[in-house]
Image (cartoon, grey):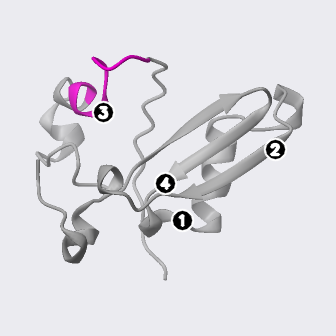
Amino acid sequence: MAMHLNWMILGIAKSGSTYNHKLVWGQLSKSQTHNKPYNYYPRGRVEIYNGVAKIFLNGNINYEDVITFLKHEFNLTPHKGIKKVRIIEDNSFHYLCYLDAEKGWEPA
């Protein structure tokens, strides 16, 4: 399946229950978000711990070209201390997007 992707990488390392995608999305301009809700687009996250990078992503974007792009953007290389990259397709409710309407997605 070929699709054109426009990427917005939010390289923000935050933790805690009070900092989340929805809050960050609300700080972006409508020209950046195209006036869509925070859960509209397919999304994911990258976690790095003990030299292992985990890429969690919506199944609609689990393609080799996307993974290659993410590895490049996040510098997931042995030179940067990454020993292994794990790909985790996450189709849980948290990662649903407009492409997942049949799975119960609704705009936030």
Residue 60 place in picture, x, y as percent: 42, 68
Q: Secondary structure at mark 1?
A: loop
Q: Secondary structure at mark 2?
A: strand
46 vs 26: above or below: below
Label 2 vs label 3: CA separation?
Answer: 26 Å
Provide the residue designation for mark 4.
Answer: 57
Q: Nearer the viewer, residue 12 or 47?
A: 47
50 vs 103: above or below: above
Question: Which mark is in front, 1 or 2?
Answer: 2
Label 1 vs label 4: CA separation?
Answer: 7 Å
Residue 24 place in picture, x, y as percent: 27, 26
Residue 39, label in figure: none
Residue 62, label in figure: 1
Residue 21, label in figure: 3
What residue type is disc 2 on? Lys
What secondary structure prevails in the magenta region? loop
Residue appearing at x 70%, y 51% in the figure:
86
Which region of the structure is painted magenta? 15-24
